[in-house]
Image (cartoon, helix red, strand yellow):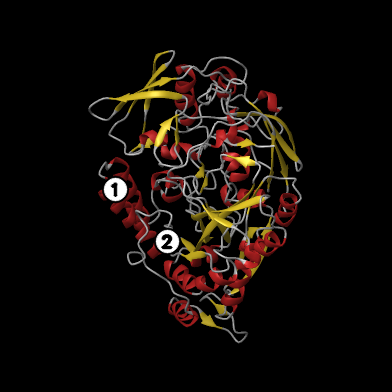
Amino acid sequence: MLKEVKYLLLAFFVILIGFLPFYLISSKPSNSIEIKKLDITNLEPVVGKEGGVLKRTLSSDPKTLNPVMAQETSSTAVIGPLFNGLTKVNEKTLLPEGDLAERWEVDNTGTVWRFYLRDVKWFDGKPVTADDVVFTYNQIYYNDSIPTSSRDVLTVEGKPFKVRKIDDKTVEFTLSKPFAVFLNAVGQPILPKHILEKSVKEGKFPSTWTVNTDPKEIVGTGPYKLVKYVQGQYVIYERNPYYWEKDKLGQQLPYIVSIQSQIIKDPDVSLVKFLSGESDIYGVRPSDLPKLAENYKKGDFTIYNLGPTPAITFIVFNQNPKAPIPKYKLKWFQNEKFRQAISYAIDRVGIVNMVYNGLAYPIYTAVTPAQKRLFDESYYPKYPYNLKKAKEILLSIGFTEGKDGFLYDKEGHKLSFTLITNAGNKERESIGNIVKEDLKKIGVEVNFQGLDFNNLVSKLMANYDFEAVIIGLTGSIDPYFGQSVWLSSGHMHMWNPKQKTPATDWEAKIDQLFKEASIELDPVKRDNLYKQAFKIIGEKQPMIFIAAPEEMVAVKNKLKNVFPTVWGWYKGDYVFIDK
């Protein structure tokens, strides 16, 4: 998602999709550059060496350093290494495993869970207790005065979990009904009561831990602590000396003791930094392959094929009645036939070939080949590229062609809208230009603009001051964790967020299907409910889905225990530098 609901232990290793381009691979690119298809099924880390500095780049400044308030990957990229939840996801099995919780028990009804905490300390040396867990849930996540998308995934049929302390190291969750992905849901970051309770009581929590906060004040439990952040320049981390995990020889993890992240908005500059040795990890775009091949030296770096990504690229039109856009445009955007017409005018296959060098998948709903249980090309509706059909639909809903060749609505308004995306993302900029030219052929004027990513996110998520946007979602292991996007009440329901009651019958139906799926324990039946929901989304096209790319990452060979996946790095704490 723009913000992932789970925080991977080493989120800084993940190629973050919300602001970087989507990255692809070729089985045999020019100049015989080696690309490794990595199957981690039987791979496990070896004992490594402590020490060294990992160098990486970030493509944007964070908007906040508060994990509860973060809604975009520019923030979670920086915050991710600082915090832990009760559980985390094993990137190999995609199943939950213990994080702050060493173990848990569930009663025979499936509704009462007890978690037993490890002996973990905060960055300031104070112990993590059940009080911190109860505080995080009851006073932060379930606090209606704190706007957070995390709350969307911490309820069962709209009802919050009941969270109470049993003793200092035991906390109990009581659910209204059995909950299929409960163990994944409690991967949300746990926060320190002794640090944050005052700001919560004073109503200041949403403005706590801003980008101007002294890093020493940000107290977590993660593998790294933030020691310095200079806006527009760099972020520096040091290993958390109190971090709980050790290797089998008792050595402190993570092995790498420091991370230095330069903030570089231009991905071309990031590529140069990687090739010059100033960074150790780089997410590869299709256009990078010739340059990488040119500079390829066996033994210097390896490009890993991570396979299909769950990430999606799409166009979304603003259907929010409160948005500061002309009412006549709102009327267009709310018409499903209008959206379907635009969908037919999107040359997905051409975009896959021209923008992604053929290394992506055309998509028509929010399911990609990475989500194997849900991906079914024959099940979901398709909108093959057909400009004639697109124009016919627009004419059928009342638009007429003017002498200038552009279409006009019944009130004489020219069919024109502004389409924005994040500047510097070459893939999205290319998509925007292709869309602009194709829509012009059927009488639709598109004003295409690139904006700074954080400015774009503010327009999309805060003031709703946009008409249409090209953006992406990272995807999630289970559709439930996309509820903030797909539920009509969701904070990230981008076309019309935070509805008190569903604005349309089809949105109400999706709400119902997601509600049923959340308590359906039979995985086949559960998948079928989600497939029905995504079929409706495909039919109504609230987002005009374009492509799901494959992903690859280049890593310097001095890094060992390297196991990247599209879901994160498996055993990321075990990565070490072999000098």
Check the picture and name the quadrant holding the C terminus: top right
Q: List the residue tagged with mark 1.
A: 526
Q: List the residue tagged with mark 2.
A: 365
- Looking at the image, residue 301 sits to the left or right of residue 36; the answer is right
| First-in-chain label (1 vs 2) | 2
Helix, strand, or loop for circle 1? helix
Helix, strand, or loop for circle 2? loop
Check disc 1 and give the amino acid type: Arg
Check disc 2 and give the amino acid type: Thr
Q: In x, y percent, where is residue 216?
A: 69, 24
Q: Is residue 337 above or below residue 307?
A: below
In the image shown, does 532 or 507 lie closer to the viewer?
Answer: 532
Of all residues shown, which one is farthest toward the front?
Answer: 298
In the image shown, does 423 or 104 lie closer to the viewer?
Answer: 104
Of all residues shown, which one is farthest toward the bottom?
Answer: 403
Q: In x, y percent, where is residue 463?
A: 60, 49
Rounded to the nearest angstrom, the CA distance separating label 1 from label 2 is: 18 Å
In the image shown, does 27 or 297 lie closer to the viewer?
Answer: 297
Q: In x, y percent, where is residue 519?
A: 29, 40
Q: In x, y percent, where is residue 231?
A: 75, 39
